[in-house]
Image (tube, coloured by chain):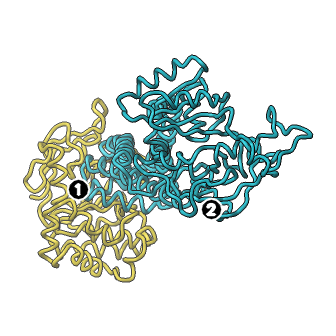
Amino acid sequence: MIVEIDRVRFAWKSGQRDILDITRLEITAGERVFIEGPSGSGKSTLFSLLGGVVRPREGTVRVLQADISQMPAARRDRFRADHIGFVFQMFNLVPYLSMMDNVVLPCRFSHRRFERAQTRSGSPEAEARRLLVRLGLEPAELLARPVTELSIGQQQRVAIARALIGAPELIMADEPTSALDEGTRKRFLQVLSEQCDEAGVSLLFASHDTRLGALFDRRISLDELNRNGAGMPGQAP
Amino acid sequence: MAMVRLALRSVFSRRVTAGLTLLAIAISVAMLLGVEKVRRDARGAFANTISGTDLVVGARSGAIQLLLYSVFRIGNATNNISWETYQDIGGFPRVLWTVPISLGDSHRGFRVMGTSSAYFEHYRYARTETLQFGSGGPFVDVFDAVLGAEVADRLGYALEDRIIVSHGAGDVSFVEHDDKPFRVAGILRPTGTPVDRTVHVSVQGFTAMHVDWMAGAPMPGLAITADEARGMDLTPKTITAFLVGLDRKIAIFDVQRRINDYSEEPVLAIIPGVALQELWDLMSVAENLLRFVSAMVVATGLLGMLTVILSSLEARRREMAVLRSVGARPLHVFALFMSEAMVFALVGAAAGVVLLYVALLVGQPIVAREFGLHLPIALPGPGDWWIIAAVVAAGTAAGAVPAIRAYRLSLADGLSMRI
Ligand SMILES: Nc1ncnc2c1ncn2[C@@H]1O[C@H](COP(=O)(O)OP(=O)(O)OP(=O)(O)O)[C@@H](O)[C@H]1O
Ligand SMILES: [Mg+2]
């Protein structure tokens, strides 16, 4: 079991209404799961919870058998760095770092991922280069350019490389395709699935675009899962 | 350490704003260090100007005033003292030597000083240095002059040249002693003291210039030529001040008291080092004010840096979320912003030091010419390092303001990419 949520309640500010109230959620290793829900339903909040950026008000969150809801903040940060890769909607990259430095960033915060990248390719930089090539980015030609000059599609692929480097067990992608056009979106999803399969990584993919759900092993509707159903009706596109 | 590297990249990526901010810090640091340097070097130069002289005696006025006009050629004497008094005090027990000083005339902006040949023998500067002749020697004739190194250099004089002395100390004088030109008999080596900017003549020569004068103006109808003057009694009636050397230092306070109690004429004897200390005490108010202003300029530079970092904060919330997602802790985010402030302060201070040395290289000859102050170009002293360390520490500490804000934001935002 890679993710296990048990009777979790979460509110951003104490005293406020719970955004999430989830009785049970289980995701097995290697699964590719699509999480759908309209804007504001709490998809990003769920990821923050699973990533150990915030902790639940009640209940337990287990990732890789570890109860991250009980960990102190520093351990949670380290756990996230070691085991989880993130891809966001847009602006995934640190603007003042090169493409290479962006990709190897997790290896600077996680010794585990540093070692894994090293074992695989000899050095994090070599591993980054390998991943970038696999993702269809020719590093030699792009390395020199500032990342802010990359197209959004290219930026998102760099973000995948960064999520994959050092082989974390879980990748969470939070609406990574909403800024992409139809064709780029397809290619992006293909590449992401391929890479996750190849690396044997579990994938959590959140989006309000229900059409994408068909490409995944399993789809979960957050509104059905979440007893508080916080989604704002009429706001979903 | 990783955060310092990130901070460097981040600062570098904002070259233009960062550059301007750094320039402001650099200028302020250069100014602060420059003020300190000029202060220190000026003190050093003043302290090095006179040594080996135990007492300076002049008409009764302020001790600082007497020191300034007699030794540093700054300002003018209000009164003279009589030759008899000079002779009298010269005969006091323990007095080994005396050197008369007569001031009041000038030559093309340089002060002319009447003295005796003993001056070149007894005057000491920089603790133990004696005056050395680069060429020629002391006065032989009444109308002989010995030039300070700078006088000769700036005015292009050589031995045997004739110079005409102007009446009064001003740069532009309308009355000239053109009937009695002086011959350049000697040129001194540079000393880095006001001696370099002085035209020395004998007190006899100084008197001879004025034999046909009365009450500060040439007497109408009476003109005495140089040769006629040579034959007259040229013992001066008055002099401006004189230097005193004692045979035993221990007697210095006794002799000083005796001179100050001298009943024939109101005179004042000062110990140069003591008067100099009084001068510093007087100057310290102005010095401290200058230091305060420079410190404020540094504070303004650092405030500019704070503004730049703080105003970038909002736009960087996404960046912070990205860093958090790859495993950065809120403390890392805090460290990133602290490091940025440190980079600014460190690079700014370093650039300030460079700027100071560039300014010194350019300004050194100008300051030497205009103010007679030699600013040696040396490595920063311990005092300078303290200033630099203080600026870097203050800048880094100021970084806590944006760093704490960033820390709070990154805690509150988590991974949400909000804008
Ligand atoms: N850092 C935060 N602090 C306080 N409230 C937040 C924070 N992040 C999200 N929220 C609130 O939590 C609720 C759920 O937001 P969330 O971002 O999880 O939704 P979402 O499903 O990801 O929406 P979208 O599809 O628009 O990204 C919203 O009401 C939002 O205002
Ligand atoms: Mg979201």
Helix, strand or loop at mark 2? helix
Which residue shows up at 12% across the image and 58% down it? A2
Q: Residue furthest front?
A: B231
Q: Nearer the viewer, mark 2 or mark 1?
A: 2
Between the C-alphas of marks 2 and 1, the distance is: 70 Å
Q: Position of residue B112 (x, y in %)?
A: 67, 46
**Residue B72 circle label:** none
Name which residue type carries label 2: Asp
For disc 2, the marked residue is B153
- The chain displayed cyan equals B
Q: Are marks 2 and 1 in contact (CB under 8 Å)?
A: no
Q: Position of residue A61 (x, y in %)?
A: 14, 47
- Residue B367 seen in the figure: no
Quarter of the image for residue A85 reads bottom left
For disc 1, the marked residue is B327
Quarter of the image for residue A151 reads bottom left
- Residue B276 seen in the figure: yes
Name which residue type carries label 1: Gly
- Decide which of tag 2 and tag 1 comes sooner along the chain: 2
Q: Is residue A207 above or below residue B386?
A: below
Which residue shows up at 44% across the image and 30% down it? B274
